[in-house]
């Protein structure tokens, strides 16, 4: 399988900081149309883990270059909210999705 994924694990300074981040990050992610899938998992009141799937390594590299160009803007907008962040990347080895049960959506 050619698809690759990036997993971000983010800890925030507070539950309010996480809520503020979530409101802003949805708009921010429009800068990266190469992303095929985003799943955000609420791991605690003050943390989340997001899985981003890309068509291939070339598209992930394109996004990484754009992220580097926008790093200052990201830091200005979100840096004060984030306590710690870890990033993992790798090939997607398995993908199953049952569309008829996909009813989740972002709720404010």
Image (cartoon, rainbow, N blue to C red):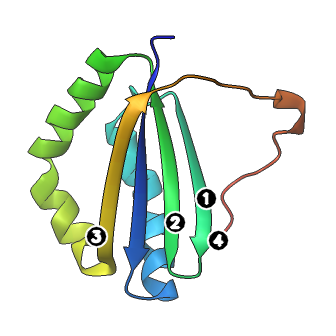
Instruction: State if disc 1 and disc 4 touch (CB < 8 Å).
Output: no
Q: Mark 3 points at which residue?
A: 78
At horizontal 51% and vertical 11% (from top left) the residue drawn is 1
Horizontally, residue 15 falls left or right of residue 81, namely right
How far is the residue under mark 2 from the one under mark 4? 15 Å
How far is the residue under mark 1 from the one under mark 2? 6 Å
Instruction: State if disc 2 and disc 1 touch (CB < 8 Å).
Output: yes
Position of residue 15 relative to residue 52, above or below, is: below
At horizontal 47% and vertical 18% (from top left) the residue drawn is 3
Instruction: State if disc 4 and disc 2 touch (CB < 8 Å).
Output: no
Where does residue 67 sit, x and y in percent of width and height?
A: 20, 43
3 or 4: tag closer to the N-terminus: 3
Q: Mark 2 points at which residue?
A: 48
How far is the residue under mark 3 from the one under mark 2? 14 Å
Q: Mark 1 points at which residue?
A: 41
At horizontal 58% and vertical 82% (from top left) the residue drawn is 45
Label annotation for residue 58:
none
How far is the residue under mark 3 from the one under mark 4? 18 Å
Closer to the observer: label 1 or label 3?
A: 1
């Amino acid at each position: 399988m050619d698809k690759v994924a990036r997993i971000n694990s983010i800890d925030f300074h507070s539950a309010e900081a996480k809520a503020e981040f979530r409101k802003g990050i949805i708009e921010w992610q429009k800068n990266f149309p190469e992303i095929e899938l985003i799943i955000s998992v609420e791991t605690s009141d003050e943390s989340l883990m997001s899985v981003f799937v890309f068509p291939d390594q070339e598209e992930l590299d394109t996004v990484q270059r754009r992220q580097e160009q926008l790093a200052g803007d990201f830091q200005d907008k979100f840096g004060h909210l984030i306590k710690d962040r870890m990033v993992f990347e790798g090939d997607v080895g398995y993908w199953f999705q049952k569309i008829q049960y996909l009813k989740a959506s972002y709720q404010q």
